[in-house]
Amino acid sequence: MSDLRIALVAEGPTDYEIIKAALRVILKPRTFIMTQLQPEATRPTMGTGWCGVRKWCHDTRLRCTEMNGTDYTLAGFDLLIIHLDLDVAGMSYADCSPEVELMARDWQWESLPCSEQPCPPISATSDQIDAVLRSWLGGHLPMHKTLYCLPAQSSGTWLAAAILPSAHALLVRVECDTSVERGLVSRHI
């Protein structure tokens, strides 16, 4: 059996490491090769963070429209993972740039920030971010096997849940607390 070929669109290089580690456990004993498409070192103009993911999705939407719904640049992959942290629900398009704020209106992207949802459960927020992500893609799936990776509240929260004891103070209401990742960093863990 050959290696599974996975393409990753993520907010940053740390997300790559966390997602790769999770996939090793999930897919074991299956091996895979993961290629990070975003952020991509040779195209720094794409940007990083959620704004870079937004730009990648929008550019992919344009390619899919031009090529009848398929993005042939992804033909060599078995799976595409698009990662976007749920804390993006509190962000604004103006955080990327004034031009992106105008684009959001022109392209009729779902609103950011999203309307505040009660948490728990986190599902109301994840549903809204799912809709935002789909609006950036214009309803197109860049390839048949696309998986959205929407960590609550961030992939850093996943890391905290993976390495800290379950009774740790940072893990109280972990899926609803946007400060877990910052708390992990401030403790130098």
Image: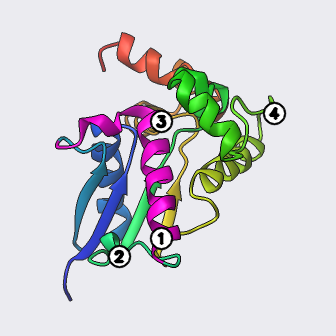
First in sequence, mark 1 or 4: give its number.
Answer: 1
Report the number of numbered marks: 4
Q: Residue at x 55, y 18 (%)?
A: 179
**Rounded to the nearest whole Å, what is the CA distance between mark 2 and mark 1?**
11 Å
- The mark lying in front, picked from 4 and 3, is 3
Q: Where does the magenta region start and end? A: 42-67
Q: Which mark is residue 96?
A: none
Dot 4: element: loop
Q: Amino acid at mark 2?
A: Tyr
Q: Which mark is residue 66?
A: 1
**Rounded to the nearest whole Å, what is the CA distance between mark 1 and mark 3?**
24 Å
Q: Which residue is mark 4?
A: 117
**Rounded to the nearest whole Å, what is the CA distance between mark 4 and mark 3?**
20 Å
Mark 1 vs 3: CB contact within 8 A: no
Q: Which residue is mark 3?
A: 50
First in sequence, mark 4 or 2: give its number.
Answer: 2
- The mark lying in front, picked from 3 and 2, is 2
Q: List x then y, in percent, for residue 63.
A: 44, 65
Of residues 134 and 155, which is closer to you in this image? 134
| Residue 82 part of the magenta segment | no
Q: Considering only vertical position in the picture, is 53 above or below 23?
A: above
**Rounded to the nearest whole Å, what is the CA distance between mark 4 and mark 2?**
37 Å
Q: Which residue is mark 2?
A: 72
**Rounded to the nearest whole Å, what is the CA distance between mark 1 and mark 4?**
36 Å
Mark 3 packing: few (<14 Cα in 10 Å), some, or many (20+)? many
